[in-house]
Image: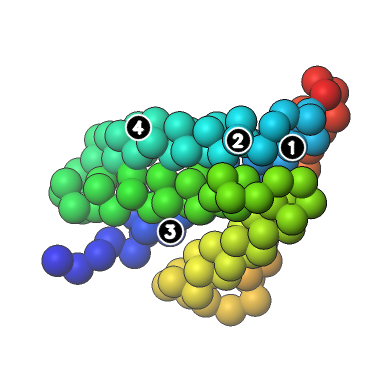
Amino acid sequence: MKVPRAAAIMGLADGTTTGIGLSLALYIAGEPHLAVWLAGLSGGLAAFPGMASGRYQSDPGDGIGGAVVCGGATAAGSVLVALPFAVASGHAALLASGLVTLALCAAVAVIRETPGWRAWALSYGITAVAAGLCVGAGLLTG
């Protein structure tokens, strides 16, 4: 099966921004590291069917395969960003989560049909905006 590139990009970008947003907001609000991990894990698991369904309904041309790729990539992005909080805490978990986020943003930029500096700027820029919004939420509620 040919992997639908657009579905993979859509899912991975969504999962990465959601994962880093949840992780940062909860970390800044002072939640325990296992709460951050649980939010990322459950968010990724819940996003899988939601994104798969949304992809299938909005672009049925990719079929079920495209929907599964989109949902799976979304779940992977959310879970991978939060995974460091399952095995570490404090600044170490935050740093590892940030490095995972940077790697996932790079993956999104590389698999785009039109790679180049614009793909990198868009991937990192959107993720930075999402992270900033969620840092603000964490500061306001923490």
The answer to the question of whether label 4 and label 3 lie on touching residues, with beta carbons closer than 8 A, is no
Instruction: Mark 2: give few (<14), some (14-19) or many (20+) Cα within 10 Å.
Output: some
What residue type is disc 3 on?
Ile
Given the current orientation, which residue lies at the most extreme bottom position? 116
Residue occupied by mark 4: 50
Of circles 1 and 3, the one toward us is: 1
Residue occupied by mark 2: 34
- For residue 115, side relative to residue 27 (left or right): left
Quadrant containing the N terminus is: bottom left
- Residue 116 location, quadrant: bottom right
Quadrant containing the C terminus is: top right
Residue occupied by mark 1: 27
What residue type is disc 4 on?
Gly
What is the spatial separation of the Cα atoms under label 3 and label 2, in whole angstroms?
Answer: 28 Å
The answer to the question of whether label 2 and label 4 lie on touching residues, with beta carbons closer than 8 A, is no
The answer to the question of whether label 1 and label 2 lie on touching residues, with beta carbons closer than 8 A, is no
What is the spatial separation of the Cα atoms under label 1 and label 3, in whole angstroms?
Answer: 27 Å
Residue occupied by mark 3: 9
Image coords of residue 51 (percent x, y): 36, 38
Q: Is residue 98 above or below residue 118?
A: above
Indicate the secondary structure of the residue bearing disc 1: helix
Of circles 2 and 4, the one toward us is: 2
